[in-house]
Image (cartoon, helix red, strand yellow):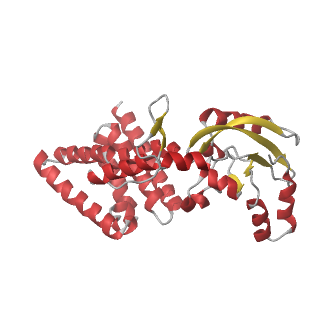
Amino acid sequence: MATSPDYLRLATNATRALADTALDCLRDAVLVVDARHKQLPLVLANAAARRCFAAENDEGNLIAAPLARLLGTASAATIETMMVSQSGAACTGRIITWRFIHGEQPVMTDIKPLAAAPGQRLVMLSFAPAAPEPDVVVAVDQLSWDMLILDTELKVTYANAGAVRAARSMVRDLGGRPVKISAHKKRLYHAAAALAAGHVLAVEEAATRMLMSAGMNRHEAVRSLLGLTRQVLENFERLGSRAAWTGPLARGDYRVISAHEEAMSELPTEYMRAYEALNRLGARVLANDATSTLARLDKIAVAERQTRKSRRIARD
């Protein structure tokens, strides 16, 4: 078990390539976090750690990621408390539940503050990755029948090669495309699907009711909106998100946005809040300069709130 930062001294006196090679040769998984920040962002992850937590095409996303992303919920709270209260340079060992690619697993982990330059506070976490049993894995994968292992919540924690092939075939037969998702990312996957389906339907229905309030009948409103929506989605598929982006926010037309919000003041408050939230989300994921765009939207929101307050005072 790596319990000393001695090997990190190599990084101070050697080239980056040599230091990386030395760290990557260690059998133990080594993570270093910046303890000055509450989120404990990762500043170092050696090869053994990267193999535990990231697929080959996703390894770069570990650096700067919050440590809690790699921990079970209870362990994340424990580590956060330790980082706040920890003083001195004493090494401590704790059983920490990590979110590995194959699922959550408790592992004895060494936690040690590192000697750092003034103004820095680095903490190293290291553990010995669970050694696989190649003979058993190979044997199970070569079974002629499909095998699944479920946990107490009936979630699949292991599938042999035959079960994986069968599942992929079923998905393709249903017209889908099989993808591999880490166990701790499945809720995020489901949330993305809900956002792209259920929430889009809510937006379409809200827009339909707005057009009906403007004088259209429901059939006319639905036909008008479906044409717009289909065109945007086709452009999204064909050209990409930014090229397909349209509307006043895409053009930087903040006067129109302000006029929209003024017109929506007569509707239930959820309409205005959804419009503001979707503008902010669009700025975050589509704008070239998200910070500037969000700042402009903040000004509009403040002005609109002041206008609504003045109207309430006038009515009273």
Nearer the observer, 142 or 242: 142
Please report the residue visible at 66 percent of the width from the left and 46 percent of the height from the top: 67
Q: How many marks?
A: 0
* Residue 91 position in % (x across, y down): 85, 40
Location of residue 241 by image quarter = bottom left
Q: Give the residue at the far top of this rendering.
A: 152
Looking at the image, is 77 positioned above or below residue 258? above
Q: Quadrant of the C terminus?
A: top left
Q: Which residue is depicted at the point 38% across and 60% down? A: 249
Quadrant housing residue 107 = top right
x 33%, y 44%: residue: 199
Residue 43 in picture, x, y percent from top left: 71, 56
One can see residue 235 in this view: yes
Residue 155 in the image: above or below residue 168: above
User: Can you see residue 304?
Assistant: no
Locate residue 85 relative to residue 310 in the image: left or right: right
Q: Is residue 77 left or right of residue 244?
A: right
Q: Residue at x 24, y 63 (%)?
A: 231
Q: Nearer the viewer, residue 133 or 117?
A: 133
Residue 42, how many percent across, how many down? 69, 52
Q: Residue 143: where, in percent of width, then height?
A: 46, 46
Q: Name which quarter of the figure residue 17 lies in.
A: bottom right
